[in-house]
Image (cartoon, rainbow, N blue to C red):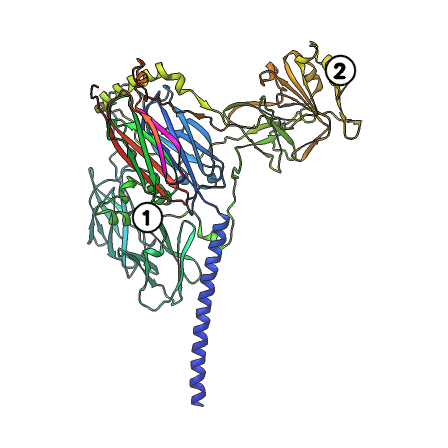
Amino acid sequence: MRFFLKHSLILLTVLLTVSLTFGQSLQTDSLVVKFDRFRRTDYIEKIYVHINQSALLVGETVWFSVYAVDGSFHKGTQLSKVAYVEILDKNNVAVAQAKIALNNGLGSGSFYLSPLINAGNYQIRAYTNWMRNQPPSFYFHKQLTIINPFTSLERKKGVSVDKKIIAAFFPEGGNIIAGVTNKVGFKLSSPDGKGVASNGFLLNDKNDTLAQFSPLKFGIGNFSFAAEAGTVYRAVIKTNEGYVTYPLPTVKPIGYALRVIDNKDHFEIVVENKTSTNWPSYLLIHARNKIVLCKAIESTGEPARIQLHKTSLPDGICTATLFDAMMYPAAERVLYKHPTEKLTINAKLNQQDYSPRRPITLDIETSSPANLSVSVYRLDSISIPSSSTILDYLMLSSELKGVVESPEYYLSNDPHKEAALDNLMLTHGWRRFNWTDVLDGKKSEKKFVPEFNSPIISGKVFNENNEPVANILTYIASPSKAPRVYTSRSDAAGNIQFEMQNFYGPRKVVLQTNTKLDSIYHIQIDNPYATDFIDSNSDDFQLNTSIKNSLEERTVAMQVNDIYHRASHEKFSHPAIDTTAFYGKPDEKYMLDDFTRFPVMEEVLREYVVGVVVRKRRDGFHFMLVDHPSKTVFSESPFMLIDGIPFFDEDEIMSFSPLKVKQLDVMTQRYYLGYNHYSGVLSFRTYNGDLGGFIPNKHALVVDLEGLQLQREFYTPTYDLQKNRETRLPDQRQQLYWNPKISTIDGKQQLKFSTSDLIGNYIIEIEGISTDGTPGKSRTIFAVKNYNN
């Protein structure tokens, strides 16, 4: 009997162990499956914008290159084909906006800075339409200083500077837990968000001093203390106005403590269960939507220690999330692995110093095939190289909450950078999703659709009572020599969307319904740009008198270039697009200059347009086209157009002067446009493709819209020949070269440009990303000297 009981207990223990292990395995598998499902349905995009300089004058041009990548692998996005780039002032008012065409995630553009722009610190902001489904903190932001030399250099008097210190505290793991040693990150900042160096100390409710602390870098630091349940803790910070007290988060009597220790070649993750149960917990480590580790952790009464070798981690930021037995996120910590794979960019000049007006040869070599952008400009007290590059943005800033001050520092060789980086992880950690959505399998609603091919113009149809109307067919077109018409039928909420192909530059656009059937409806179009913003805490911009000499020199150079080279700066390249009308080759085409000209449209249609039958009745004119395939006549009116703009009233067509029409196209068969069909097409095309002065129907909405930005050509003279160098035209270029589209397919590329008349030190800034998603940067200095030869 004892033998039987003994072996039964052993068997029961084994079965319970197996059952528990199996249950834990099911939990981890379920967590992995749910996270992977979420990842596959929630595609993430990031954008980085490389600008030619971080400080410019009005009258100069901002040149920029756009890198749009997927959030997981940093390869060029295949989802979006349009990027939105803006320059915003301190009130989030746009002074410049553009839609930039993307090809494999790459695009470029420019903004001429009008003299009407006020001096100040502005923000370059960029995003895709798909990214608008996330908060604006996920958009790209970068400061751009614009100086207007025609404003006073005097510093404004009476401007008070807010010296208040803002303190924030971030317990490691998320909570302060009683009974363990808690590490707490802190950030001390001024109202403009800049870090502040100050001292502080930690007190309990008995006024005992438990710790003293000061920030290590940029106002960020940490301290540790053993917390007790029921005790209230506060931090006291020394400021210019005395001492200020800040409460710490409330101590949790029970919970999970999560600590991360950086041991150079590996991270040690320490988990302490301070709950009343011995149930297991689950650790999930993920990076850029990719799972690194999912592990069940037994509760043994002692801290669990997980060794995580850095070679097993992807480069950049990882997030460790601890779930309790009920799969509720209990603690979280962000950690960082320095990039081991970098795109190496070597820039080699054919010499180190140059005379004015001399050719320069620049050889670029990359460690792998890459797409790069290159900016070459003169260094002065205004033009200071940007503190942020594509490397630190993609690998650091884009994954952290809030603005990271001097992000390039964390990738430098400073001996304190590791400790500073750990402090940054404590204070800026975040994630791009809600764990509840992931675990519940909930799909987040997407208000904004990706623009797979071209810009989308959206809007809404209303009736005379301003109520949205469903199932109304709408049309959009722009007067053109290459007619294009797009249709959209309103959904249940009255929404309409048009995908505008080959839509470039400023255009006049006509939106309408079939006014002959439903003239009571009107259309409103949506703002294509995002209308939500991050908080802006920048100070009022003040010009510093120390830049006076550089400013005067730059101002003269800007005006000289404007006078002598304006035409060269106003050249735009037009993309090669199909100029065929949307209906293709017409069945009948009439070049009206080949026939006897009639002053009245009725005579033209009756006399020599074979495929059109004209009838005049009491209610006006009616057109009926011959259906050649069936050898019959359509009973309904054809689809009528002037320069691509639909017209639904034959009387309007008849009132148009045929002397302004160059060509008449006729489709003598049933024509399908989208899901709609028409009894043929009758298309009038004027000489200039501009409606010839004809005004669309009064019920139509006529608006000016910007399509994709046309590419401004960067002007650079060549001085290979002596006669070119001897020209008397002044060359005051401060920006010697800009090229947003450098491709090193075989790892090499050679560039040629020339120096100007300006002597001084110049910088070559190269940024880019390899075809496999690895970012890189390079900076090279050279000099232009006057050797008098």
* Element class at badge 2: helix
Residue 136, image x, y percentages: 42, 38
Residue 73 placed where, x, y %? 42, 47
Can residue 324 be spotted in the picture? yes
Q: What numbered label is drawn on residue 339?
A: 1
Q: Where is residue 353 in the image (x, y as percent from the top left)?
A: 23, 28
Would residue 497 appear left or right of 718 to someone viewing this image? right
Instruction: Count residues near mark 2 (Cα–Cα under 10 Å), then give few for <14, some for 14-19, many for 20+.
Output: some
The residue nearer to you, when weighing 659 against 533, is: 659
Relative side of 323 to 183, left or right: right
Viewer-proximal residue, 746 or 689? 746
User: Which numbered disc, 1 or 2, marks the residue that appears first in the sequence?
Assistant: 1
How many circles with numbers are drawn on the protein? 2
Q: In the rendered image, which residue does mark 2 sit on?
A: 606
Whether residue 686 is situated above or below residue 366 in the rendered picture: above
Find residue 717 and report its image quarter: top left
Compared to 304, does 428 lie above or below? above
Q: Does the magenta stretch include residue 741?
A: yes
Q: Which picture quadrant has residue 293?
A: bottom left
Residue range in magenta is 735-750
Quadrant location, the N terminus: bottom left
Few, some or many residues within 10 Å of mark 1 (<14, 14–19, 20+): some
> Looking at the picture, which amino acid does disc 2 mark?
Arg
Residue at figure coordinates x 37%, y 66% from the top left: 276
- In terms of secondary structure, where does tag 1 sit? loop
Q: Position of residue 93 (x, y in %)?
A: 41, 28
Q: Is the magenta stretch mostly helix, strand or loop?
A: strand
Magenta stretch contains residue 125: no
> Which of the pair 32/247 is nearer the observer?
32
Who's the residue at 47% across and 61% down the image? Answer: 29
- Whether residue 535 can be seen here: no
